[in-house]
Amino acid sequence: MYWKRLPTSEIRNTIKKAFDRNVRFGKSKVMGLPISSMDPRIFQKEGVQQSPFLYAMLQNANHGGCPTQGISGDFFEGTEQLEMEAIQICAEQLMAGKPGMQDGYIAAGGTECNMQAAWIFRNLFKRKYKAESHQIAIVHSEDTHYSVWKIANLLGIQQLVIDVHKTSRQINLQDLRTKIKKAKAEKIEYFIVVANMGTTMFGTVDNIDNLTTVLDEEEVFYKVHVDGAFGGFTYPFTHPKNSLNFSNSKVTSISLDAHKMLQAPYGTGVFLIRKGYLNYLATTEPHFMAHKIHTLSGSRSGANAISVWMILRAFGSKGLQAKVKRVMDLKKKMCADLDKKKIEYIHDPYMNIVAIHNRHMVREIQHHYNLVPDNHDHPTWWKVVLMDHVNESMVQSFLDH
Ligand SMILES: Cc1ncc(COP(=O)(O)O)c(C=O)c1O
């Protein structure tokens, strides 16, 4: 076995060249995806001494397990305390949970958080109610993120994909009812319901009250998981009185992604769940630290975990509210201009995505602004995502194109 060792200067140059081939925030016009740079106000580019995040990376803390299950005596107790504080802010302030009544941890991203929730509910149904895998289904709209397809496959459970209305992108309740009835007839009795707090393509927020009304009328047993990976750090600011949070007794768990609107480094999701549920992941096998068994991932980056704390504390809720307001104001202006130009688009009024109809699109615009379609073979809509690095002049030049 052999591979060549490279001198430090060559490694540095190779990495630089690799980054030169990527899209670059600030240079390329990236308007079609919910991606952004790490927030430059928090993660300064100057040397390690000035950058607590780079310092944290180099210290390489390993946060295993779930901090809300107890951290005292751990090797990384100091930074785990910051992770716990970040979880508490997200669960209790952003997501209206009662103090001390939620568990959570900083996961690798929305996919892991969604997986963790579904895994817990599947085990709950199996362990407490003796359900078989074929009696359990995950229910979600057709616009839901593809992580749920992976989850159904990995957990070996059934999947009910519900149609949406083609312009509002809201769940078709008649289709939901029909598919639930059919599932019941096929002896599916336990449902993991994913409610979107912002779909990936359209930013649509599912109406949880409509969803749960149908499920209650059909008298089925279900648990609701809110996928706030895209909208979790936006929607609570634009619509503070919403019911997709722990103030709603029907919501059991929530996913958030800190590497979208919050601009944390990639690999930073936030998993939140009401207390009492993590026990369904407990194994009977021997383990060396009791609380290490409650997370899908084993070793986790302490630096990523505390980056959430850094951002939340550096902005405070008022600062984040102002950050979200700026992109929403930009979106409002963009919609007003699209109206004037009689361009067809759809959007959720509380979210930062505008999807523009394909007939107004030309290849040059799609390419220049890095836009993404709903379907790569037969596009109907192209989304523009208003993130923090998108400024007025980018939007103006897009509209003038
Ligand atoms: C709504 C939604 N859920 C889940 C995910 C998956 O998140 P991640 O890529 O962080 O795993 C995304 C990512 O775009 C998303 O938009």
Image (cartoon, rainbow, N blue to C red):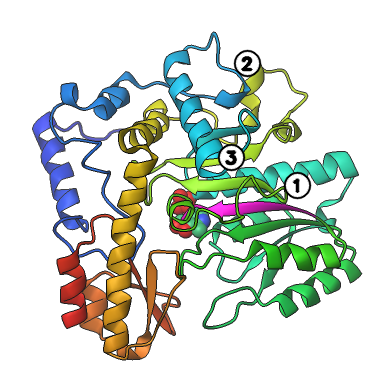
Residue shown at 25% from the left, 83% from the top: 363
Label 1 secondary element:
helix
Q: Are marks 3 and 1 in contact (CB under 8 Å)?
A: no
Image location of residue 92, percent across then percent down: 55, 36
Instruction: State which quarter of the image contains the C terminus.
Output: bottom left
The answer to whether residue 124 is above or below residue 375 is: above
Distance of label 3 from label 2 (alpha carbons)? 21 Å
Q: Secondary structure at mark 3?
A: strand
Query: To which residue does mark 3 refer?
Result: 272
**What percent of the width, then of the height, locates residue 202?**
46, 70
Q: Amino acid at mark 3?
A: Leu
Q: Which residue shows up at 48% across the image and 24% down it? A: 63
Q: Is residue 178 left or right of residue 304?
A: right
Magenta region: which residues? 222-230
Residue 380, x across and y down, in percent: 43, 84
**Nearer to the camera, 97 or 223:** 97
Which is closer to the viewer, label 3 or label 1?
A: 3
Residue 299: image x %, image y %? 50, 27
Q: Nearer the viewer, residue 55 or 255?
A: 255
- Three-letter code for the amino acid on which mark 2 is drawn: Met
Vertical placement of residue 209 versus 247, above or below: below
- Residue identifier under label 2: 289
Identity of the residue drawn at 61% across and 23% down: 292
Q: Quadrant of the N terminus?
A: top left
Residue bearing the label numbered 1:
122
- Locate residue 232 relative to residue 140 in the image: left or right: left
Residue 130 vertical position relative to residue 284 in the rendered view, above or below: below
